[in-house]
Amino acid sequence: MAKALNLDHLQIAMPPGKEAAARNFYGKLLGLGEVQKPSALAARGGVWFACGPQQVHLGVEAEFLPAKKAHPAFAVDNLDELAALLVAEGYGFSLDPLEVNGRRRGFTNDPFGNRVELIQSEQNDRNAVL
């Protein structure tokens, strides 16, 4: 029987003309490497990033509405450091008091208002407190 094997990419909507903001948040702040979009798709706008073996595609949506509940969750190497960086850059960060499988996590919003979860990587969990 046919089945899905793994996650290839996820797509997050963004408003038109905001690629620089996407590059700043997902590239500079979250540290994702940009992936060149295929030339056939580049004219549509948006920007793609690598996150481990998967990709995160920011796709332009003309009638954009931010995702307030649905969200990507990124495992991060230092939740406290990244949270402090996001706050310093003007993004909010809310630490969730409930851990998931012993891992601390919190939430922020990307520049477009989409919810983003950040969860401490199992390899780097320092059990630090913000």
Image (spheres, rainbow, N blue to C red):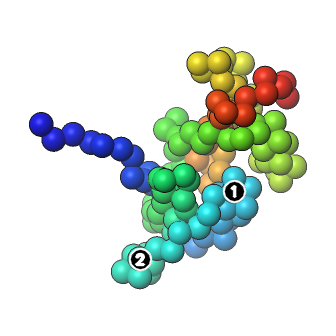
Asked whether residue 50 appears in the rendered view, the answer is: yes
Q: Is residue 123 above or below residue 116?
A: above
The residue carrying pointer 2 sits among few (fewer than 14), some (14 to 19) or many (20 or more) residues within 10 Å by Cα, namely few
Is residue 110 left or right of 89 when viewed as pictured?
left
Asked whether residue 64 appears in the rendered view, the answer is: no
Front in this rendered view, residue 3 or 19: 3
Indicate the amino acid at tag 1.
Answer: Gly
Which sits earlier in the primary sequence, circle 2 or circle 1?
1
Quarter holding residue 123? top right
Q: Residue at x 39, y 46 (%)?
A: 7
Front in this rendered view, residue 85 or 67: 85
Residue that badge 2 annotates: 38
Dot 1 falls on a residue whose secondary structure is: loop
Which x, y percent locates residue 85? Answer: 83, 48
Q: Residue at x 57, y 39 (%)?
A: 73
Residue that badge 1 annotates: 31
